[in-house]
Image (tube, rainbow, N blue to C red):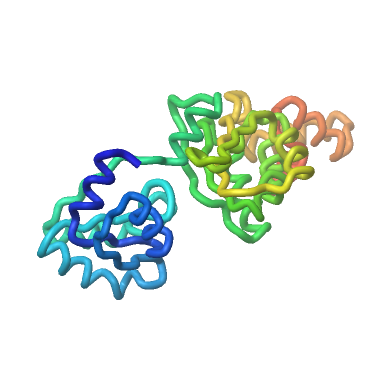
Amino acid sequence: MTLRGLRLLSQVSLIAAEDTRRTRQLLTHFQIATPLISYHEHNKQARRTPILKALDQGDVALVSDAGTPLISDPGHELVQAVLAAGHAVHPIPGASAVISALVVSGLPTDSFSFVGYPPRRASERQRWLRDLAVEPRTLVLFEAPHRLRACLQDLRQALGGDRPAAVCRELTKLHEEVLRGSLDSLERHFAQDEPRGECTLVISGAPPAQTVWDEARVGQAIERLRREGLTASQAARAVAEESGLPRQEVYRMALEAR
């Protein structure tokens, strides 16, 4: 918490909190007695009117359970409604897992893409990751601990096991941990160690050579090698080695091109 954040929480007339129980612990710790109202994904429509009415009388603070509100947390619609009603919105700097993980990962920070949480269903997550396989910018994403192992396995298959990455756990908290390595090594680590705490993953962007291997080029390379006498499996293996793409991804792209 910053000094500015504490001052504002004690001065506003109302605090809209994602979970009032968790926010009350924070307020109790700092002896702040500002009234609380819950605001989360399941009651956001009902809460909008009383929050807007409170803004007519004074300032309101929006607080999430952890990190920065609106970053994979509810609040976007509320900010729109507040602006439409003619009120001002001010960001109060605080902890952000996205930026904290990016700067501690050791991966390029000059250009990155934050993609939020992966889909929960395995088939949807795999398709989602395949679309990100050729993204040249550093990737930042969130994942829950009970889905981390499955996510790392899908990342390795979609992006390649040698892709550099970092898994950042419990950032800015007591049990902060940052693990760096290839997707292969990170998957092996968490196969042995139970994932705990909220996780932020940072993954290196696709190498420049990889970004030009689209479905059309893969299909053409496969057909050329088949004409030279290679089997489909041998051709796919050769294209995977040349392009740097995972062999499974080459098979998929070749089928789509066909």
Name of the residue lying farthest toward the bottom = 46
Residue 3 shown left or right of residue 187 in the figure: left
User: Where is residue 161, by image quadrant?
Assistant: top right
User: Where is residue 244, by image quadrant?
Assistant: top right
Q: Position of residue 207 (x, y in %)?
A: 60, 26
User: Does residue 149 appear in this view?
Assistant: yes
Residue 134 shown left or right of residue 226 in the figure: left
Q: Residue at x 25, y 64 (%)?
A: 35
Q: Position of residue 248 (x, y in %)?
A: 76, 42
Query: Residue 51, relative to residue 164: is it above or below?
Result: below
User: Does residue 201 appear in this view?
Assistant: no
Q: Residue at x 50, y 31 (%)?
A: 137
Task: Please count the marks in the image.
Answer: 0
Q: Position of residue 72 (x, y in %)?
A: 44, 53
**Considering depth in this image, is 60 or 45 the residue closer to the camera?**
60
**Considering depth in this image, is 116 or 177 the residue closer to the camera?**
177
Query: Residue 20, relative to residue 143: is it above or below?
Result: below
Q: Position of residue 135 (x, y in %)?
A: 54, 35
Q: Residue at x 38, y 55 (%)?
A: 64
**Considering depth in this image, is 224 or 45 the residue closer to the camera?**
45
Query: Residue 81, relative to residue 221: is it above or below?
Result: below
**Considering depth in this image, is 68 or 207 the residue closer to the camera?**
68
Q: Residue at x 67, y 42 (%)?
A: 155
- Indicate the quadrant containing the N terminus: top left, top right, bottom left or bottom right: top left
Residue 123 shown left or right of residue 93 in the figure: right
